Image: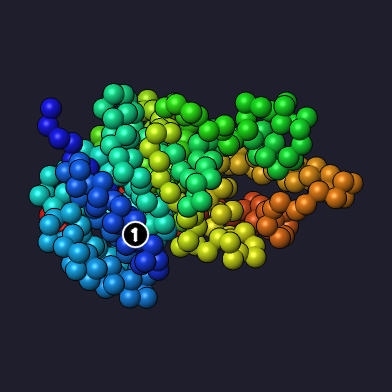
Amino acid sequence: MTQPRILTVILNYRTPDLTLKATEAAVREMRGLGGEVVIVDNASGDGSFEVIKAKGEQEGWTKDGFLRVVQSPENGGFGAGNNFGMRLAMSSGEEPDFFYVLNSDAWPDPGAVEKLLDVMQAEPRAGLVGSYIKGTDGVPHCTVFRFPSASGEFEGAARTGVITKMFKSSVVPMEIPTQTAQVDWVAGASVLMRREMLDEIGLFDERFFLYYEETELCRRAAQAGWQTFYVPGSEVAHVGSASTEMKAWARTPRYWFDSRFYYFTKVHGRAYAIWATLARLAGCGIYGLRRLLTGKPQRDPPGFTRDLLSHFLAALVSRGPSRRDVSLARPMTEDNK
């Protein structure tokens, strides 16, 4: 059996130090598998591109053929930046067999990518295979989920035991499997994707700036008969949200609301997106009442319900996503090589 060609894609946005740490781990993994790494600087504009490129040359990664550093002309978000990398070929000009998408603030344990590859080779209809994600403190992160639904929106916002029991099959976060398992979708911090699948269904939808893009891709894959697997034996440490500074957010950013509403609209239609939002608002109302009666802590970002309602009302009069329509295909030209 010939060795599969793997192209690792790491997206950098103003986190060069973390990106280089992720790159070091990725290069180590690719050396053992005969793969390559491409870093896409997502128009950082802070000197990241130059810093990363210089470090790659200093370490000999670029000279050895394990690393390329490229620059996207604009910051189109997570999906667009990764698509920019996945439209590239191997340095030899050959098509990759697999793409390994790795967050810039994540680093795989030794052998983590090989464990993903093992599942890909054992399961011919596996299109996406995700890792067990843990914090740098070793605490596991929940990165395996059911597809979002209106009932899941209601349950997740209400946070009430009796409601959770009623809608148990709709709870979006899943209990972390202890063995390799087929799931609805996995978070995009460490995911191996089959190129054959992407050629069939397309890449990330670039109308998602950030959030829900991997959810929609896994959904599209499932509709085409491809499977998503979670592999607990493939361990990856993840800082989490470094490039978006999520911990510093005082409010939920607009692009989260945009992505959420667009996801439901694209997958289920506009009427369902409206229904799902009403369900979430109802759940928020129930939890708000519980807080008043029992003194439970606020678990949403400040102003979340108000912001959700405001975005919902604006979406009702909007004609659709404001971001440009783009091709999801992987055209191969001489410029890609």
In the drawing, does residue 192 fall left or right of residue 216?
Answer: left
Image coordinates for residue 3, horizontal then vertical, percent:
15, 35
Image coordinates for residue 127, horizontal then vertical, percent:
34, 32
Q: Quadrant of the C terminus?
A: bottom left
In the drawing, does residue 175 fall left or right of residue 187?
Answer: right
Q: Nearer the viewer, residue 212 or 68?
A: 68
In this view, which residue lies farthest toward the front?
137
The residue lying at 37 percent from left, 42 percent from top is 191
Which of the 4 image quadrants contains residue 129?
top left
- For mark 1, give the secondary structure: helix
Which residue is under mark 1?
21
Q: Nearer the viewer, residue 5 or 252?
A: 5
Q: How is the image coloured?
A: rainbow
In this view, which residue lies farthest toward the left?
92
The residue lying at 16 percent from left, 58 percent from top is 335
The residue lying at 28 percent from left, 67 percent from top is 52
Residue 52 to residue 325: above or below: below
Residue 250 to residue 207: above or below: below
Which of the 4 image quadrants contains residue 252?
bottom right
Q: Amino acid at mark 1?
A: Lys
Residue 333 visible here: no
